[in-house]
Amino acid sequence: MIKLALEHVGHQVKTASDGADGLVKFGDGSAYDLVLLDQRMPGIPGIEVLTELKKRDPKARVILITAFGTIDLALEAMQTGAGDFLRKPFTAETLRAAVSTALEKPCTKMDAVPVKLACREFYRANINGFGFELDHESEDDRTGDFVCTFKVSRSHESNTLVGIALPTYVKELVLAYTDTEQVPGGVRFWQAMCEEALANYLWQHADTPPDRYLRIEDLSTSLQRWLDSVLTVSLSD
C-alpha cells in the first residue's frame, strides 16, 4: 500500500521483505534518495538497520516508521543519526507529506544527536511530515501562562504559528515531581517542555492542534518520562 500510494504521485519505489533484504538492495545507497524503514521487522530491528545504513552512506535520508504511541524511540533514533519519523497507522496524505518533507532536506550528513540534546531538539526532526522551530515566547497577560509560539512547517505548505501554553500550576507540578526548587537551564527548560508537548501532539495526531493552540493541562506519562530523561542527563552533567 505504501508503494502504491507513493507511485501514484510519481515516485519510483523498491520494496524489501526485511532488514537483511533491505541492506542488500540498498548497497552503498547511491541508487536511492530516501529509505522508509520500519522499526519492528523480522530479523534485524530497524534501529540496527539504521546504524548500518548510516555506516554505508552517512548522508542517507531515512524515515523511521513505528507504531509506538510515544516518541521515546525517536530519541533513540536521533542518537543514531535519524531525523525523520512516521507513526503508524497513517494516511496516504501523511505518508506523502513526510516523504516530501524528507526529500526537501539537503542531502548532507545527519550527525547523531547526544542524548542531552536529543531530549530537547525535536525541531530538527520531521515528525509525520512536520518540522518546527521556536519563533518567540511570551506571557499571557490574562492567565499568566508561559507561552511558546512555534513555526510549524510541512512539505510545500506555508508556516503555521502554533502556541503552546504552560500554566504556572503545571510548573509547580514539575517542581514537585522533580523535588527541586529550580529547574536546570531556567527558561530554556520550559521552552524544551513546550517543544516536547508539541512534538508529542504532532506524533499522536499528525496534525496541528485545534485553533493552533495547545495548553498543557497536567503532567502526562510521556512528559514524566521526558522529565526523568532530562533530569538524569542534567545530573550526570
Image (cartoon, rainbow, N blue to C red):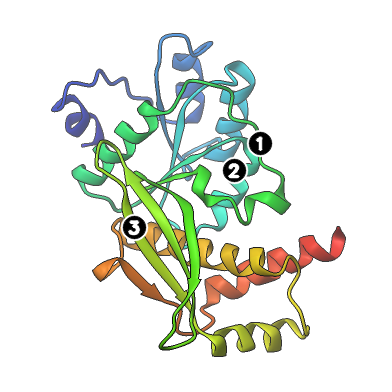
Q: Is residue 198 left or right of residue 80?
A: left
Q: Amino acid at mark 2?
A: Met
Residue at (48%, 39%) from the top-left corner?
Answer: 42
Query: CB under 8 Å between callouts 2 and 1?
Result: yes
Residue 162, given in percent of the width and then of the height, sits at 36, 62
Q: Is residue 215 left or right of residue 7?
A: right
Residue topped by disc 1: 112
Give the total of numbered labels. 3
Q: Above or below — where is 85 with respect to 101? A: below
Q: Residues within 10 Å of mark 1 (few under 14, many from 20)?
A: some
Residue at (26%, 46%) from the top-left corner?
Answer: 94
Q: Which numbered disc, 3 or 2, marks the residue that appears first in the sequence?
A: 2
Quadrant in which the C terminus is drawn: bottom right
How many angstroms separate mark 2 from mark 1 (CA)? Answer: 6 Å
Residue 54, given in percent of the width and then of the height, sits at 60, 25
Of the two numbered discs 1 and 3 in the rendering, the one whose residue sits closer to the viewer = 3
Q: Amino acid at mark 3?
A: Leu
Residue 50, given in percent of the width and then of the height, sits at 56, 32
Q: Above or below — where is 101 with respect to 140? A: above
Quadrant in which the N terminus is drawn: top left
SS category of the residue bearing label 2: helix
Residue at (55%, 90%) from the top-left corner?
Answer: 169
Q: Above or below — where is 170 with respect to 154? A: below
Query: CB under 8 Å between callouts 3 and 2?
Result: no
Report whether residue 192 is seen.
Answer: yes
Residue topped by disc 2: 78
Q: Amino acid at mark 1?
A: Ala
Residue topped by disc 3: 161
SS category of the residue bearing label 3: strand
Q: Which numbered disc, 2 or 1, marks the residue that appears first in the sequence?
A: 2
